[in-house]
Amino acid sequence: MDLIPVASYARTSQDSRPRDERGVRNQHRINERTARDHGCVVVATYTDNARSATKDDRQRPGFDRLLADLHRGHAFTAGPLRGVVAVADDRLYRRPDDFIRFMAALTSEPDRVYVGRDGLRDPYTKQGLLQGVESLQGAVAEGRMRSLRVQDWHWSRAMDGLPHSGPRPFGWQEDRQTLHPVESELVRKAIEDRIAGSSMGQVAREWAALGMTGTRGGRPNPQTVTQIITAPRVCGFRAHRGELLIDPDTGRPLVGAWEAIVPPAQWAAVCATFSAGSLYVHRGPLSPRLTGRKAGPKYVASGFLRCGAETEGGGRCDQLMGGGKTAIRKSPYNYVCTAGRGCGRCAISGPLVEEAIERLLFPADGKAKVRLPESMRARWRSGDMGFEEKRRVIGSVFAHLVITPGKKGCVTWDHSRVVPVWKWADRFTPAEPAA
């Protein structure tokens, strides 16, 4: 009897301390045994290590690649795929959206199987579908309970006045309680300068000139500097989930167990220099706060474009390019490399970029690097596909796109300026610009 060729998928939410990927390796080993026990053979593996499947803003490139290959009908080098094996359903999906995407990809061709620890499952039958729905309900319920436990844990820490558990905040040392001698003085001076009338761009440039970076290695920019100086922690107050915590015994703001950089009055004064509803200031009730809106990208390609201008040292700028409105009718908005963060020497029309992306995803000759469903092409071109779905499609196909500088005096659209860097680049021939 011929063995059924299947894909093995493995995912962990967190890696172990040594970052050795042992968890996903063990899952693939179990998947190979499960496949053998049920007349299948693993011909391709797909992995998402330390990737959550609960939150909708978390990317899972391995899962996206698996779905693309299922729609295509085969893995690039492994041949046809007739099913998927996983140690548990919740490794594949924990959200209804992902369940729908997975089932659509798995059943896009006939005679596919899903292989679990309990045996083969027919995804085309009502019983097989109900089994998947039941596992989804369990995963959703478990995810909610886990989320509540994590929220309660963070709230309890906050009420005890303990620092945040994430990366150390700028201005404090690794213990999150003792002031950093250099960074804390920069924060103090930035607060004083802002109250005196300085712009945040000026402060960010001063920090960049001193060679300062954030605690995660990023370069200073007006938004991050503003977030640093308006955080309640600079005056010793403890906030939680965007709200200033109040001590139930005194009725006053809860004071954390760390050294303050400035007194509360000075913190309130610097917060007052920003207009109400500022995107940068989303703090407690003593400061202007954004309400009723969720900050997010305004343009389809935001976050995917990188500047391809050459630097003085012969390298590439490689800074993210942001979108902004213009007064030009043909190009109502541009993507620009901003001076200060980047070289400031590269800009491109927004509609041109999005037209180039469409050409890369759905070329006229049909010879795309990545095969996407015909229904997706129709929905994209008809305008039925929404903003967020378009961004998910772009993010599932491209690692990013490099924008090369334009030619002086050229007034026509040059789609070749948009150079894609494909995900799974090792599977493709060298990257080519949009035609």
Image: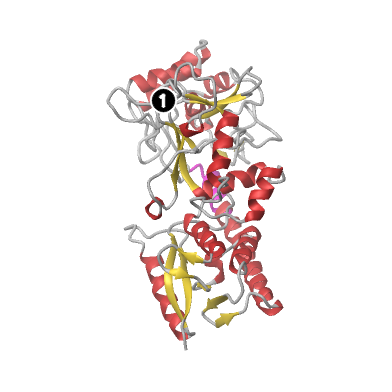
- Disc 1 crowd, CA 10 A, few/some/many (<14, 14-19, 20+): many
Q: Residue furthest top?
A: 196
| Residue 282: % across, % down | 60, 32
Residue 337, compared with residue 393, is above or below; it is above
| Residue 293: % across, % down | 68, 35
Dot 1: element: loop
Please state if 132 lies on the left or on the right of 83 as rendered.
right
| Residue 116: % across, % down | 53, 77
Residues in magenta, as a range: 152-162
Residue 400 belongs to the span the image colors magenta: no
Q: Indicate the quadrant where residue 16 lies.
A: bottom left
Q: Residue furthest left?
A: 313
Residue 379, compared with residue 283, is above or below; it is below
Please state if 201 lies on the left or on the right of 273 as rendered.
left
The answer, for residue 254, to whether it is visible in the render is no
Q: Residue furthest bottom?
A: 1
- Report the residue at 47% width, 67% height from top: 9
Q: Indicate the quadrant where residue 433 lies.
A: top left
Identify the residue under disc 1.
342
| Residue 342: % across, % down | 41, 25
Please state if 36 lies on the left or on the right of 181 as rendered.
right
User: What main secondary structure does the magenta stretch of the protein show?
Assistant: helix
Report the front residue among 270 and 157.
Answer: 270
Q: What color scheme is it?
A: secondary structure
Report the front residue among 288 and 60.
Answer: 60
Q: Indicate the quadrant where residue 143 lies.
A: bottom right
- Report the residue at 46% width, 31% height from top: 417
Q: Amino acid at mark 1?
A: Gly
The answer, for residue 307, to whether it is visible in the render is yes
